[in-house]
Image: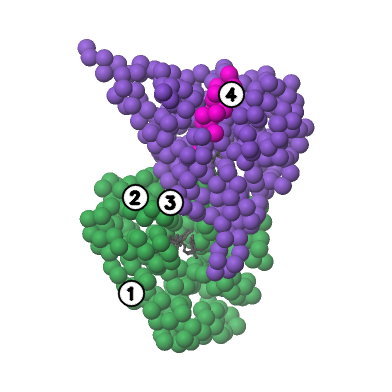
Chain colours: A purple, B green
């Protein structure tokens, strides 16, 4: 038997989460999972990050909420969701039998709000972790404000850590001067993992109407355009912390994903690329496997952080 | 209804004018059922400036031959790239997307299309005709060049035309057509698709005459499958997605249109 037919091990561990493979979907780009069931078997994924969940119903920002930009898009959806109670009653039953990990993206405007959502999600058996979104650029209060200062990032992490005993991932904002410092601050307060990057602040103008393209004037940039920036943030963060790092930003294919793994990400998330190809995550999983076979690695863990800088 | 992704093969690209074209597409596999008002998300290849897919209404469907057609007006970079497709090229579509027009209670419907907004009306006219309903079709445009394939609808009912410059049909906007001059209109339902101001004018007219009215909105979309929440419409029941809960809305539900 030649060793090329032995399938490499794709599984990775992010704190207590045992992921079948390192490929997860990014919050706000995959709904809750059912939206994609027509296009793929969502249980093939390493994990699903849900749309942001807040303590109360939020309508989000006014239309228009998106603008296409070169190899990417701006959005200012603004955390539209029906609140944590609605999630528990109406959405959780539809996803609780998934065999992939489901992680809820938690957001709010106050520390108390974040704590309330975390406490309410804690008893849900299927939800083995939450991702604290302290990096949403699209809401007036809270959101990114928590993620752009070390003391605030630390205080919200600390407060949620006290009420939430399962896996706590903190999602970082790239709109800062030193992202590694923020990563260390949340690690010190008990975060089990950090994920990055959320969207980069950006803007676009309709010159015919001389008006901003988004109702909120500025929004968050995502898609292939942000990939080099994201990679250069994952790299120093992975070197700065001991907890596992989840990388994202513009990943559209297996090569992109492998770049993030080599830069030190234990797992990756795919966002905007799901809009172009709703089955792209399955292709990325297969592509990572092909790469490992081609380079004769028996496990994906053999390439994580193995960037050769000599 | 299951949505799917297929690589269609272009078997004909009819350039109707400098701006309008109809793409005739062959599906390699059996197409799922497509309802009047539903749309596709098309992937524009070889156009680096076009990253997101582009939404288009389904114009015709031939279930026997497994074919569909899209009627497109050049609006920018993506549609200009699609105009260059020729027989043998492929076009990747996610479809069928969105809800569909609701069939009317009464037996006489008026279908109004402004410019390329006529695209979803062909399948609707055919469906209504098959159900034994009486159909009138009103097509509006800026000039005669914006009135696309009007004769196609004659097999389903009367066709009326308006142009802003009077170069074809009656001069003026669709809502100024003599069809609406009487006190009591014969229609039990009006369907409209076209530029936003046109649809709002039709909606107001329908309301003033007490006629039920559905419109197909053209909100900007990123995903087209209900995942991004970019395409929302404010309704009396809160925000709805135009791509899953729309694009067809009854105008009585549209909050900003009252
Ligand atoms: C549900 C739905 C059905 C549609 N059906 C058809 C159809 O059958 N035939 C057809 O020709 N067009 C249709 N459209 C509009 C079509 O999607 C846009 O014209 C197209 O996306 C423009 O792409 P572009 O790259 O050429 O333009 P871009 O270069 O992206 O933009 C050029 C101009 O087009 C406008 N535009 C961009 N997107 C839209 C949009 N979604 N709606 C209206 N204007 C837009 C922009 O504001 C801009 O002024 C539909 C739109 C929706 C949402
Ligand atoms: C339409 C849209 C909505 C998003 N909503 C959220 C959200 O609710 N919470 C969050 O943490 N990130 C949200 N994001 C950010 C993504 O999860 C991701 O961090 C970012 O888009 C970068 O990855 P990408 O380039 O692969 O899309 C959203 C992104 C997009 C495009
Ligand atoms: S376009 Fe993404 S939800 Fe409608």
Q: Which residue is mark 4?
A: A240
Across and down, in percent, residue A194 comes to 59, 27
Are the residues flagged by discs 4 and 2 in contact, CB closer than 8 Å? no
Q: Is residue A235 magenta?
A: yes
Chain at tag 2:
B
Q: Which residues are magenta?
A: A233-249
Whether marks 3 and 1 lie on the same chain: yes
CB within 8 Å, label 1 to label 2: no
What element does badge 2 sit on?
Answer: strand
Number of the label disc, if any, that sits on residue B166: none
Q: Which residue is disc 1 drawn over?
A: B17
Callout 1: chain: B
Q: Quadrant of the N terminus of chain A?
A: top left
Residue at label 2?
B92
Q: Is residue B105 visible?
A: no
Q: Quadrant of the C terminus of chain A?
A: top left
Measured in 3D between alpha carbons, the distance from the residue under mark 2 to the one under mark 3, in whole angstroms, is 14 Å
Q: Residue furthest top?
A: A1
Q: Position of residue B138 (x, y in %)?
A: 46, 76
Residue at 30%, 70% in the rendered image? B15
In the picture, the disc for residue B51 is 3
- Asked if the residue under mark 1 is in contact with the one under mark 3, i.e. CB atoms within 8 Å, the reply is no
Q: Is residue A52 above or below residue B106?
A: above
Q: Is residue A11 magenta?
A: no
Q: CA distance from mark 3 to mark 4?
A: 34 Å
């Amino acid at each position: 038997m030649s060793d090329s037919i032995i399938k490499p091990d794709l599984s990775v561990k992010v704190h207590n989460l045992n992921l079948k493979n390192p490929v997860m979907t990014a919050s706000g780009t995959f709904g809750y999972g059912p939206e994609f069931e027509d296009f793929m078997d969502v249980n093939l994924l390493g994990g699903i990050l849900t749309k942001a969940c807040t303590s109360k119903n939020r309508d989000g920002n006014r239309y228009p909420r998106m603008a296409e930009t070169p190899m990417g898009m701006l959005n200012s959806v603004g955390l539209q969701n029906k609140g944590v109670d609605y999630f528990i009653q109406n959405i959780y039953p539809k996803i609780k039998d998934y065999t992939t990990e489901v992680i809820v993206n938690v957001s709010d405007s106050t520390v108390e709000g974040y704590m309330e959502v975390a406490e309410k999600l804690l008893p849900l058996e299927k939800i083995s972790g939450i991702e604290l979104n302290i990096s949403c650029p699209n809401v007036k209060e809270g959101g990114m404000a928590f993620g752009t200062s070390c003391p605030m990032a630390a205080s919200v992490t600390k407060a949620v850590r006290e009420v939430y005993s399962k896996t706590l991932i903190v999602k970082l904002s790239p709109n800062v001067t030193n992202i590694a410092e923020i990563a260390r601050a949340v690690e010190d307060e008990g975060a089990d993992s950090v994920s990055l990057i959320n969207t980069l602040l950006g803007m676009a103008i309709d010159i015919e109407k001389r008006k901003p393209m988004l109702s909120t004037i500025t929004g968050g940039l995502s898609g292939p355009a942000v990939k080099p920036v994201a990679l250069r943030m994952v790299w120093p963060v992975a070197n700065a912390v001991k907890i596992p790092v989840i990388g994202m930003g513009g990943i559209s294919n297996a090569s992109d994903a492998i770049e993030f793994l080599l830069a030190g990400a234990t797992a990756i998330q795919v966002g905007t690329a799901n809009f172009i190809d709703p089955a792209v995550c399955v292709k990325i999983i297969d592509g990572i496997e092909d790469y490992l076979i081609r380079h004769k690695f028996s496990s994906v863990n053999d390439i994580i952080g193995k960037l050769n800088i000599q | 209804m299951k949505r799917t992704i297929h690589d269609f093969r272009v078997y004909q690209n009819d350039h109707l004018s400098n701006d309008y074209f109809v793409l005739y597409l062959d599906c390699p596999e059996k197409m799922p059922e497509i309802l009047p008002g539903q749309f596709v998300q098309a992937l524009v290849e070889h156009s680096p400036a076009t990253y997101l897919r582009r939404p288009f209404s389904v114009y015709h469907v031939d279930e026997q031959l497994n074919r569909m057609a899209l009627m497109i007006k050049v609006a920018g970079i993506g549609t200009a790239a699609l105009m260059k497709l020729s027989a043998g090229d492929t076009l990747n579509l996610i479809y069928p997307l969105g809800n569909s027009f609701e069939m009317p209670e009464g037996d006489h419907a008026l279908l109004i299309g402004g410019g390329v907004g006529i695209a979803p009306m062909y399948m609707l006219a055919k469906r209504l005709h098959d159900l034994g309903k009486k159909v009138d079709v009103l097509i509006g445009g800026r000039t005669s060049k914006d009135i696309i394939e009007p004769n196609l609808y004659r097999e389903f009912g009367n066709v009326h035309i308006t142009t802003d410059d009077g170069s074809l049909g009656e001069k003026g906007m669709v809502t100024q057509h003599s069809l609406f001059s009487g006190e009591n209109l014969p229609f039990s339902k009006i369907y409209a698709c076209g530029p936003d101001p046109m649809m709002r004018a039709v909606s107001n007219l329908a309301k003033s005459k007490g006629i039920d009215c559905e419109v197909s909105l053209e909100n900007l979309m990123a995903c087209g499958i209900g995942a991004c929440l970019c395409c929302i419409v404010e309704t009396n029941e809160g925000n709805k997605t135009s791509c899953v809960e729309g694009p067809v809305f009854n105008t009585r539900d549209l909050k900003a249109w009252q």
